[in-house]
Image (spheres, helix red, strand yellow):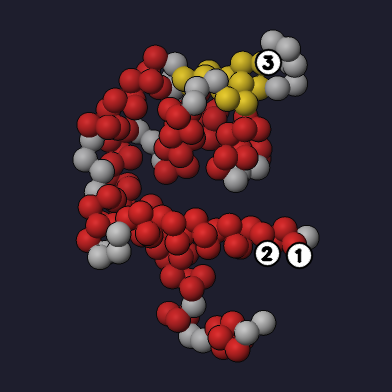
Amino acid sequence: MTEDAKATLVRGLDDQICFAVYSAAHAFNRAYRPFLAELGLTYPQYLVMLVLWEQDGQSVKAIGDRLMLDSGTLTPLLKRLEGNGLILRKRGREDERQVLVELTGAGRALREKASLSANPVPCAVEDSGVPPGRLLDDVRALREALLRRAAAEG
């Protein structure tokens, strides 16, 4: 561990990278709230819909892997989306143990509504003064480094 890394352990809350990321995640959720209210979605439900808008007809496992969610967290999200008429869950034809998730017509239509709604988050990211592409690359690199470290430590 480098001296800088050791020093991080004893810094105050506002000097912790983990707190900056944690509090930024909460700020993202707050910023998204009005946009998502128009869509009738929570932030985690929106993430599920984004995954399905990219590629419809995915397995529950594939969605969970993509969003880094376990089935205990994902299943209630899917039940709510299904109850709202946005998705259908079906057993796989070749393997009935597999559950596939498909968009309904309403789920596909919601994508259009989302694209036409005012999303304040991209503007806020631009207002930060950090180029959005660089910010995204930096956050992804941090996430991957943390995942590699967690996997190595078992």
Residue shown at 49% from the left, 26% from the top: 55
Using the image, tell me which numbered label, if any, was put on residue 153: 1
> Which quadrant does the C terminus fall into?
bottom right
Q: Is residue 39 left or right of residue 79?
A: left
Q: State the SS at label 3.
A: loop
Three-letter amino acid code at the position of disc 2: Arg
- How far from the left and from the top, in percent, is residue 16? 49, 77
Disc 3 to disc 1, C-alpha distance: 35 Å
Q: Give whichever of discs 3 and 1 has the lower sequence position.
A: 3
In the image, residue 1 sits, relative to residue 22, either above or below, namely below
Three-letter amino acid code at the position of disc 1: Glu
In the image, residue 21 sits, relative to residue 36, either above or below, namely below
Disc 2 to disc 3, C-alpha distance: 35 Å
Residue designated by label 3:
92
Three-letter amino acid code at the position of disc 3: Gly
In the image, residue 52 sits, relative to residue 27, either above or below, namely above
Crowding near the residue tagged with mark 1, few <14, some 14–19, many ≥20 C-alpha atoms within 10 Å: few
Q: Nearer the viewer, mark 2 or mark 3?
A: 2
Q: Is residue 85 left or right of residue 131?
A: right
Q: State the SS at label 2.
A: helix
Q: Are marks 2 and 1 in contact (CB under 8 Å)?
A: yes
Q: Is residue 44 visible from the viewing direction of this image?
A: yes
Q: Is residue 83 visible from the viewing direction of this image?
A: no
Residue shown at 60% from the left, 62% from the top: 145
Using the image, tell me which numbered label, if any, was put on residue 149: 2
Disc 2 to disc 1, C-alpha distance: 6 Å
Q: Nearer the viewer, mark 3 or mark 1?
A: 1
Q: Give whichever of discs 2 and 3 has the lower sequence position.
A: 3
Residue shown at 29% from the left, 25% from the top: 112
